[in-house]
Amino acid sequence: MYRIIAGKWKAKKIAAPRHFDVRPTTDFAKEALFSILENTYDMQSVAVLDLFAGIGSISFEFASRGTQDITSVEMNPKHTSFLNSTASELGFSLQVSVQRGDVFDWLKKFRNKKSFEIVFSDAPFETEEKKYQELISLVLKNKYLKENGVLIIEHQSRMKLDHPNLTDTRKYGNVSFSFYRPNEESSIETTEE
């Protein structure tokens, strides 16, 4: 179970069926994250990509705060069904587009189709570091981020995700958020070759 912290559905509790194997972002970490984001972005005008969306803790937090363009990618069919039914129940169906698929395959397939101000990833905690690095690379190299965009990776605090584009890591207990800026040099590199 998780609750929406702010916006239209503030304090609304969302409970997933018992047999779902999910780990929603804690309220404490989510509150801190959105405090950072709201100081940088106008929630109503950003486009958001939520990778490993689970049961929608992050997607619905954005929607409750007025974000109109949210793409949620999740592989588990039970979770995508839950995402769709919850979006409908809360009146978010027009704001939240649920895409069922493996995140890595999805990122390879849809590259250069659309870019976002915020890309958020909450991969399973047992994900290996090399898979995180692949994810960072797929998002940055395929221009999923707008110029002013940010990629945020939620991961276990004991894991360090170093990368040249890493700008900050914030720790909240055993959960950390690492922030990455888009590539500025990528367009220069290709013209020099």
Image (tube, grey):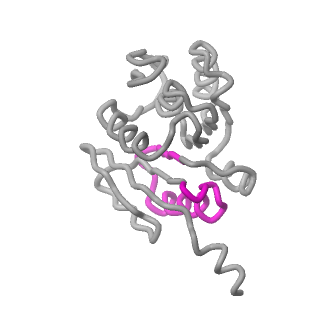
Q: Residue 162: x percent and y percent?
A: 39, 67
Residue 124: x, y in percent? 46, 44
- Asked where in the image residue 23 lies, by quadrant, the reply is top left
Quick one: which residue is furthest to the left in this view? 173
Q: The N terminus appears in which quarter of the rendering?
A: top left
Residue 55 appears anywhere in the view: no
Q: Position of residue 167 (x, y in %)?
A: 39, 62
Which residue occupies the foreground of this view, 74 or 13? 13
178 relative position to 130: left or right: left
Q: Observer-nearest residue: 121 or 116?
A: 116
Residue 46 seen from this side? yes
Residue 94 vertical placement versus 39 (above, below) = above
Where is residue 190? Give x, y as percent.
70, 79
Q: Residue furthest top?
A: 89
| Residue that appears at 62% across and 73% down | 186
- Magenta span has 134? yes
Instruction: Pick whichever, 63 or 153, lies toward us.
Output: 63
Q: Is residue 184 left or right of residue 3?
A: right
Please say if 23 is above or below 169: above
Q: Residue at x 62, y 31 (%)?
A: 68
Residue 72 in the image: above or below residue 190: above
In percent of the image, x 63 and y 52: which residue is there? 104
Is the C terminus in the top left, top right, bottom left or bottom right quadrant?
bottom right
Q: Is residue 76 above or below residue 117?
A: above
Which of the 4 image quarters holds residue 78? top right
Assess whether residue 84 is covered by the magenta stretch. no
Find the magenta span and give its range. Answer: 119-148
